[in-house]
Image (tube, grey):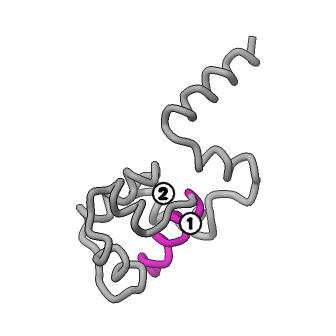
């Protein structure tokens, strides 16, 4: 698995630039760029910060079933781009539909 390619794929699904992801994760922009270009190998700690920022577990990061993308469904793609607050509001709304 190309870790840098996977990070870039997940980052782009969230519509984050390298700078935005680095700032949100609290990591160096240049190091993140080097990782995405496969010039550097990230540590587990670094990868954990990136995954946490992208709202994905390390398990899902390495899961072969999710390596081609989270989903082609536009609804799922839209959900992954939501902020945590927006996801909570959406979940509350969906709960009202179940009654």
On residue 60, the disc is: 2
Horizontal arrangement in the rendering, residue 34 relative to residue 55 (left or right): left
Given residues 19 and 78, the one toward you in this image is 19
Identify the residue at the far top of this view: 99
How many numbered marks, from 0 up? 2
Q: Secondary structure at mark 1?
A: helix
Task: Give residue 8's position: percent from left, percent from top.
Answer: 50, 72
Task: Give residue 23's position: percent from left, percent from top.
Answer: 33, 58
Given residues 1 and 28, the one toward you in this image is 28
Residue at figure coordinates x 41%, y 61% from the top left: 21
- Badge 2, how many Cα within 10 Å: few under 14, some, many 20+? few
Horizontal arrangement in the rendering, residue 5 relative to residue 13 (left or right): left
* 2 in the magenta segment: yes
Task: Give residue 83's position: percent from left, percent from top.
Answer: 52, 41
Task: Give residue 56's position: percent from left, percent from top.
Answer: 46, 52
Horizontal arrangement in the rendering, residue 9 relative to residue 95 (left or right): left
Q: Secondary structure at mark 2?
A: helix
Q: Which residues are magenta?
A: 1-14
- Mark 2 or mark 1, whichever is nearer to me: 1
Residue at figure coordinates x 46%, y 49% from the top left: 55
On residue 33, the disc is: none
Q: From this view, report whether residue 93 is shown above or below residue 69.
A: above
Q: Earlier in the sequence, mark 2 or mark 1?
A: 1
Q: Quadrant of residue 82?
A: top right
Identify the residue at the far bottom of this view: 39
**Most common SS among magenta residues:** helix
User: Can you identify the residue that label 1 sits on?
Assistant: 12
Mark 2 in CB contact with mark 1 (< 8 angstroms): no
Residue at figure coordinates x 50%, y 32% from the top left: 85
């Amino acid at each position: 698995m190309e870790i840098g390619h996977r990070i870039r794929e997940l980052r782009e699904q969230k519509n984050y630039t390298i700078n935005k992801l680095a700032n949100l994760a609290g990591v160096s922009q240049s190091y993140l760029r080097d990782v995405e270009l496969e010039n550097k190998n990230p540590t587990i700690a670094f990868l954990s910060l990136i995954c946490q920022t992208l709202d994905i577990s390390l398990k899902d990061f390495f899961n072969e079933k999710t390596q081609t993308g989270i989903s082609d469904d536009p609804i799922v793609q839209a959900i992954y781009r939501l902020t945590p607050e927006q996801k909570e509001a959406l979940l509350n709304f969906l709960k009202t539909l179940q009654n």
